Image (tube, coloured by chain):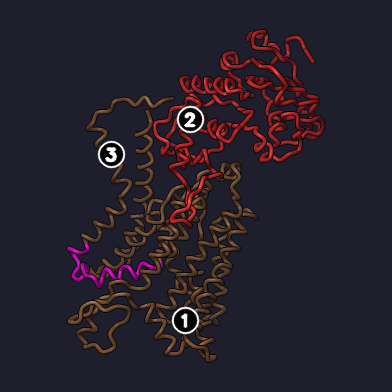
Amino acid sequence: MATGVPLLRVSGVCKYFGGLTALNRVDFEVLPGEVVALLGDNGAGKSTLIKCISGVYRPEEGTVFFQGQPITGRSPSAIREQGIETIYQDLALAENLDVSANVFLGKERKKKLLGFIPVTDDAWMRHEAEKVLDRLDIHIPSLRQKLVNLSGGQRQAVAIARAIYWNARLVIMDEPTAALGVPEQRKVLSLIQSLSAQQIPVILISHTMQDVMEVATRIVVMRRGRVVANLPRSAATVDSIVKHIVGAGDMTD
Amino acid sequence: MSAATRPKSTAASVQDNVLDFIARFWSYLFLLALVIFFSVTGQGFFSVRNFSNILVFSTLVILMSIGQNYVIITAGIDLSIGWTVGLASVIAARTMRDLALGGMEVTPAIIIGIVAGLLVSLIPGIINGVLIALVKVPPFIATLGMFGIIRGAAFLLTDGQQVVGGLPQNLRDTLSAFGNGSLLYNVPEMGLVWFNRPPEMTPLQLRGTDMLVPYPVIVVALVALVFGFILARTQFGRHTYAIGGNLDAARRVGINVNRHLIIIYVLSAFTAGIAGVMHVFRFTAGSPLAGEAQLLSSVAAVVIGGTSLFGGAGKISGGVIGALIIAVLTTGLVILNIDQLWGFIVVGVVIIIAVLVNQAQSLLERRKTAH
């Protein structure tokens, strides 16, 4: 299912923090429609790699290409404009606002009241939010609901819906199921699958092996700043992955 | 993830809805209860004249609560607006007086005085905003510093006097015609009179005249409507709530948070400036102390009205109701001839009740949607 030119290509990226080598000549690719699980122990370099892609960090060496264009060194907001959306654990939502206000936060649609007073077009935004939620098969009883009253999985879904509405082409998710109950985890996983079905690839950081084995199409393991394994899901077993994570497996530099 | 709402017993859900209604509108109900209580117990409380007095009396706190409300919704606080009211009143009074004494006509002198008072009131707001948004000084500290600075500046401008007086009589008459005037009067044996008190009135008519629509109340109602509308319906209002709810999220979606916060503090100073100018109209003099005693009332009004000090929630109408509760309490106690000191105690208790009710309400809301 994953074919064609890579949407994202990380080539020879190095990142140092003082004397510490956080990323050591990392190569990494994501093809359209893939779900790439990024695994590794704490400090293996997963988050650093993600931050180099999303523009939070600027790598010392190497290049990040997105849709064939180098995006290394651009600002996080410029990279998000390009279509790479990172959904962090804290989700970056305003929990005191309702669902559609969050989907449109910062980019509110406006209309003119009495022909000259600019006000937010809440009905239109609610309708649009409904459409994108439907498209992702997300059910939230009322879009007027403030997020603080929604479950963790529903908030996760709102964050994803926002990314999709604003034309995310690649979604990076950092531990999306960490804080969720089991039914909620299942929903988020099926959300990830429906993204990839719509040809939007996902990079998934997770410590939960069941999640990874269920949704990933490819598994990339990092250790000490290097990519030590890069396997299609079909070639991976939990055992072999764990060996790579702890460094007991075959090194494949 | 879908809402598999458990069937609740109808009795429990009715009870929840009643509780929710009370939690949501308790400040309105409390105001109503106060009015009924004082009307039954206090001689002369239930009268057009008294209600009109209460409204005029509350204008100062309402104005200050409007700006304060915006600030508190962003999870800030503005301690400096009490002295900003004083500063604006001093500047406006001095400007009008000096221009009038210098031979200028009354109307242009008043207009220039208004503009000067309002413009000067923006200065502490700009400084507050820059300190808080750009230098990252906590709002409490920044506006506490400004509290001292404006207090000193206002008194320096009056050479330490508590009142800027000495306005010529014709100027004072014009100011008072608006500051203590009404769009519509009810005069005994004469009926409704528009715009101005009739020139010739018997002592009975003088005593019996009611101001039905006092000008200061019109001004404050307009300001409250405009700022309430901006908060509730515009993108600026939406972003104000977002900043109070999650500052980082607001920043990450591209809201210019720093600029927004500066505007918020300028707005807070501006509504204080309006209050200062209005003081000059009502008292035909300026005073550094014009709003000093009302600072805490403005915070109290906002909190009573349901705005969370943690930011992210609140309405302008809430602050208006809060200010009215304080005004009704104060006036009611006077009419019942109870020591004003009890007023402080009651307002203190009401503030604490307000916070408790708000907490209970968010619990209720969560219980209603949780499943």
Q: CA distance from mark 3 to mark 1?
A: 53 Å
- Compared across the picture, whether B109 is left or right of A53 comes to left
Crowd tier of the residue under label 2, counting other residues whose Cα lies within 10 Å: few below 14, some 14–19, many 20 or above: many
What shade has chain A been given? Answer: red
Q: Residue visible at 37% across and 81% down?
A: B177
The numbered dot on residue B17 is 3
Chain where mark 3 sits: B
Q: Examine the rendered structure and indicate whether residue B229 appears above or below residue B277.
A: above
At x 52%, y 61%, the residue is: B267
x and y percent of residue B94 in the render?
A: 52, 82
Mark 3, Cα crowd under 10 Å, few <14 / some 14-19 / many 20+, is some
For this view, does B42 lie left or right of residue B55?
left
Magenta stretch secondary structure, dominant: helix
Report the label total.
3
How crowded pointer 1 is (Cα within 10 Å; few <14, some 14-19, many 20+) is rated as some
Disc 2 target residue? A133
Q: Which mark is residue B163?
A: 1
**Is B49 within the magenta?**
yes
Chain in brown, by letter, is B
Q: Secondary structure at mark 2?
A: helix
Relative image position of residue B83 (x, y in whole percent):
50, 69
- Magenta-highlighted residues: B38-60
The amino acid on which the numbered mark 3 sits, given as a three-letter code, is: Asn
The quarter of the picture where residue A12 lies is: top right
